[in-house]
Image: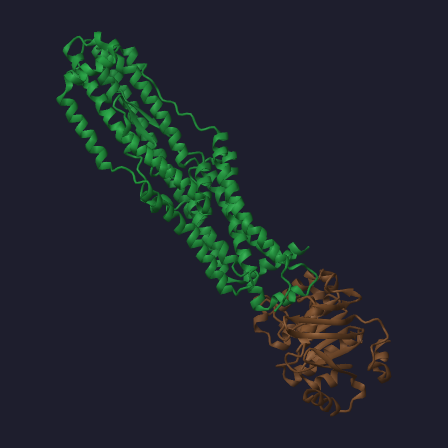
Chain colours: A brown, B green
Amino acid sequence: MQSQTVSDPEVTSQAPTVRPILEARSLSKSYGETHALSELDLSVAPGDIYCLLGPNGAGKTTTINLFLGFIAPTSGQALVADLDVAEHDRETKAYLAYIPEQVMLYRNLTGLENLEYFAALAGKKLEVDQLRSTLVEAGLQSEAIDRRVSGYSKGMRQKVGIAIALAKEATALLLDEPTSGLDPKASNEFSALLEGLRERGVAVLMATHDLFRAKETGTRVGIMRHGRLVAEMSTSELGHSDLERIYLNHMRE
Amino acid sequence: MTIRTVFRNEMRLLAADRVLLSSLVLFVALFAYAIANGFAWVAKQEGTVAAVQAAEEERGAALAAELERIAAGGDPGSPFRDPRAANVLGGNLGARTVVLGPGPLASLSVGQSDLLPYYYDVSIYTNEQTFLQNGEVENPLNLMVGRFDLAFIIIYLLPLLVLALSYNVLSGEREQGTLALTLSQPVAVRDVVVAKLLFRALLVVGLALGGSLVGAAVWGGLGAPVRLALWCGAVVTYGLFWFGTAAWVNTLGRESSWNATVLVGAWLGLVVVLPAVGNIAAGILHPLPSRVEMINTAREASNESVNRRSELLARYLEDHPEMAGGVVDDVAGTAALSWAATEEVNRQVEGVAVRFDEQLSKQQALVSRYRLVSPALLAQSVLNDAAGSGDARFAHFEAQVRTFAEEWRGYFVPAILAGQVMTAEAAMGRPEFVYSEEELSVVLGRSAMPLAMLLTLALLAVVPAAIRLGRVRGGG
């Protein structure tokens, strides 16, 4: 079971031994003289929740956008299930689900209709019952399913985002600041959902500022600064205050 | 798969958007009103045609009765009312009314048919003035805007509906954030945007085509399938131009408000300003001779000819020595003199008419070249031509009327100059006008160039839009 592999402190600080779903090889992105990302090497295996920490402009979102193919790398490769994103844009997206900081859906449609549409775009034609149970599984209250999304909170929209990931049976989940702006209860619920996905063997790559959430939820943590990955560790190796100390040390350098 | 999925979603979005739904309902109402308006115009035109034809029949019956009465020994009363006199019979008494019926798809487009004459009384007095009275270029706004018919809605208002539905087809997705979620699915964004545009195009163009078919069916235009196909081809191509333009503007990556401003500006420029500027430029560059000058010339010629009748007759007979023997008695001599005076007036008027025609053709040539830059003018010319309410069909009618007037004069003038008495048989056997409709191949040939040009303009918008859409990646 992959979860045993990743919980082993001896191994998790290294690259995982199972085939990673997400892999960056010397991945770089520059905008003229500005290096948004430099020589990133990173891999996320099934059952791994990899948290990318770093200040604004560290290259976290750039990394996620490169895996999604939203931007093209200047050099290096972003691989999803061993496929180069630059060459296999559509094939790689079949493996991916994306939850941005604000999951934006069609406001005039219901949660169910949004899920049906995006699942269908991903090639998954589900019956109404299946769509309902997926939304419930993603944590959405059943009475909200047929309400218009314009009345949803950020947390509820995220749950629809998770439901899309579940419906398309994504093997990798890319999250960009998912817990910012969520109250602690909603954050906890979200972490529980991620844990559920991890247990299913989904590889999760999450960009976040939230050190506490990274420590609690993540299995591995990477610290980024100025477009570089400056540290990488397994959360099981860390004590409660260790992560904050390490992070701040790196920020001072 | 993508198309069906997007169509289903678009249908839901449309159903949930009250503003858009209301706009569509408003357009359906406008279509219905335009069809009713077009139908009312055709009914009016047909009513006029029926009335003038009835009046002519009445005149014919009265003429026959008068001839019968005179044959039975009745007195015509005055030589000016004697139907046996060639100048009287060939003049107003026996004049033929020639008519041009409404075009095959007239209920769809009134076109020029409310500006150009569709009936004339042809007599020996028919001359250039008869045609010129109606030949002046009208108020450009009238020419340009026309009546509130289906062609008006398609040319002027349909682009606005297209723009309202598609100005934010991509920018809106980006602004509301759904583009990121769409782009993270294994689909090409081009496929999604094209499917969204296709849904809107089917809605808008379908509405226009449906309205056209209903409008045509109401007045029996379904009997002209080739013209209807030409009409539909112009509607589809014109729609393609506007959807292509909206798609292209969307690919520039600007916000929706910017797109809306640019597209409304394009509508204003291409549909309203350019055609008006073209008409004004034509008027300034090739001004028509004044109508007052025309009328004065005719009056002066008429007065002079009255004063110099003998001289005129002598000159006329010098020109036509074969007619000299016929001027025998006083009445016939007066008629011949009068005819010579008429000919002199015609000759004088012709001078002005030639200049008028030259300027008019220059204007029309300029407008014809100029329309190539305006998709609205191109589409309008094809729609009018397909409907049979454009300039060309009226020119075709007028040419036949001129030929008929020649034939008419050829029938009566020798008799006038020879002082012949017209028999009842000759009176009843006077020339009749039969309008022959333009060949379809001529209509199609004339429409081929504007339609091809319209298609070229549409492709100039669609192709770069398609290329740029293929490059859309970022979800931000």
- Residue B209 can be seen in this image: no
Tag count in the figure?
0
Q: Is residue A161 left or right of residue B203?
A: right
Residue A238 or residue B192, whichever sits in front: A238
At 23% across and 33% down in the image, what residue appears?
A: B294
Task: State which quadrant residue A122 falls in.
Answer: bottom right
At 68% across and 59% down in the image, what residue appears?
A: B187
Vertical order, A248 against B249 (above or below): below
Task: State which quadrant residue A76 falls in.
Answer: bottom right
Vertical order, B426 against B252 (above or below): above
Residue B409 image point, x, y percent: 29, 18
Task: State which quadrant residue A247 falls in.
Answer: bottom right
Q: Quadrant of the N terminus of chain B?
A: bottom right
Q: Is residue B35 left or right of residue A251?
A: left
Q: Quadrant of the C terminus of chain B?
A: bottom right
Residue A192 or residue B375, whichever sits in front: B375
Residue B307 image point, x, y percent: 12, 22
At 24% across and 14% down in the image, what residue appears?
A: B319
Residue B29 image point, x, y percent: 44, 51
- Residue B216 can be seen in this image: yes
Q: Residue furthest front?
A: A33
Residue B237 image point, x, y percent: 53, 45
At 53% across and 64% down in the image, what residue appears?
A: B254
Residue B230 or residue A241, whichever sits in front: A241
